[in-house]
Image: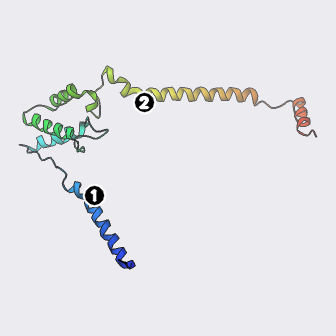
Amino acid sequence: MLLIPGQILRKLLLIAIAITGIGLMPIGFAQVDTFAFDTPEQQERFRQLSNDLRCPMCQNTNLTGSTGGVAEDLRREVHRMIMAGMTNQEIEQFMFERYGDFIFYRPRLRAETILLWFGPLLFLIIGGGVAFGISRRAKVVNAVHGAPLSADEQTRLHELLHKK
């Protein structure tokens, strides 16, 4: 069957639309967690905890933004604990005991996390010290080797440069 250019263009367009539709199907069927709360304060606590807790399965996504199964389970667990009357501190302690410091975007300041908190400052200080030392040595080298040439040295340099 011989197709003219207009028919080819129409067929390609239909194929592109079909591929796009197939690619968007999972988005349309994505699961959305809906939780019922007794008070708006409970809902706000749930949002805050879901935003502050990291999904243990995902690389760097909080519970709110993760679609992973573990995140769904943790959102259900947080909802259950809020509805059971647990405080934010109790919920955070439960999550810490289960998953460790990784569960928090801002880990607690403890002996095990001291390098995590102050490591960047330590590296900045070390880097500044190294840069200062290099700069100081460069000034000393320039002072010693950057002194003007004596008349004899200038004559010798001129002779070397203009030798044939």
Pick whichever of labels 2 and 1 is earlier in the sequence.
1
Q: Residues within 10 Å of mark 1 (few under 14, many from 20)?
A: few
Furthest toward the front, the residue is 1
Mark closer to the observer (2, 1): 1
Name the quadrant containing residue 11.
bottom left
Rendering coords of residue 32 (x, y %): 16, 49
Q: Let me know if residue 25 appears in the view.
A: yes
Secondary-structure class at tag 1: helix
Residue that label 1 marks: 23
Please tell me whether residue 118 is drawn above or below residue 44 in the rendered image.
Answer: above
Rendering coords of residue 145 (x, y %): 75, 28
The three-letter amino acid code for the residue at tag 1 is Gly
Q: Residues within 10 Å of mark 2 (few under 14, many from 20)?
A: few
Residue that label 2 marks: 120
Please name the residue shown 19% across and 51% down the image. Answer: 30
Specify how the rendered protein is coloured. rainbow
Rendering coords of residue 100 (x, y %): 25, 27
The three-letter amino acid code for the residue at tag 2 is Pro
Q: Is residue 145 left or right of residue 86?
A: right
In front of the other: 48 or 67: 67
